[in-house]
Amino acid sequence: MELAKKVKSLEQQKERLEQVFKSTMKGGNMDLIDEVQMLVRRIEFLEEQSDKRAKTNYLESQEPYLREIEMLKSKLMQEREMRDQVIQKKNAEVSYFKAELDALLSEM
């Protein structure tokens, strides 16, 4: 929110400076034109810095979430491995029970 306000403020300043620049072009005051061009460059530089800062802030705010996602992925893999082990154990028990049952049935 704060960055959006700052960007909007900078855009308004830029528009005002462009209007001043256009009006002075008609008058031919070169010193003022040079100053305005310098201010326009400064505003563009500040806008770039603001964009970089916004990206950095976004990435920093996402870092805890990314770490949590990695942790949850790790837990998920562990749970899958444990579930696979349980399934293998149960399949082995079922196979053993089936073999015993087949042996008992063949004796009858």
Image: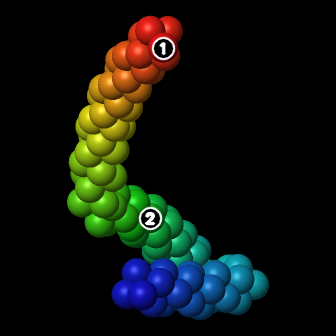
Q: Quadrant of the N terminus?
A: bottom left
Q: Which residue is mark 1?
A: 108
* Residue 58: quarter of image: bottom left
For residue 56, say whether it is visible: no
Q: Along the horizontal axis of the image, is 7 left or right of 56?
A: right
2 or 1: tag closer to the N-terminus:
2
Which of discs 2 and 1 lies nearer the camera? The answer is 1
Q: Is residue 25 left or right of residue 1?
A: right
Assign a secondary structure to mark 2: helix
Type of residue at label 2?
Asp
Q: As displayed, is residue 51 above or below residue 81?
A: below
Task: Give the residue at mark 2.
Answer: 51
Residue at figure coordinates x 30%, y 50% from the top left: 72
Using a 10 Å C-alpha cutoff, classify the residue at mark 1 as few (fewer than 14 neighbours), some (14 to 19) or many (20 or more): few
Instruction: Using the rendered image of the protein, determine whether residue 59 is visible from the camera's viewpoint.
Output: yes
Taking depth in this image into account, of 21 and 99 the one nearest to the observer is: 99
In the rendered structure, which amino acid carries the disc numbered 1?
Answer: Met
Q: Residue 56 location, x and y as percent?
A: 33, 59
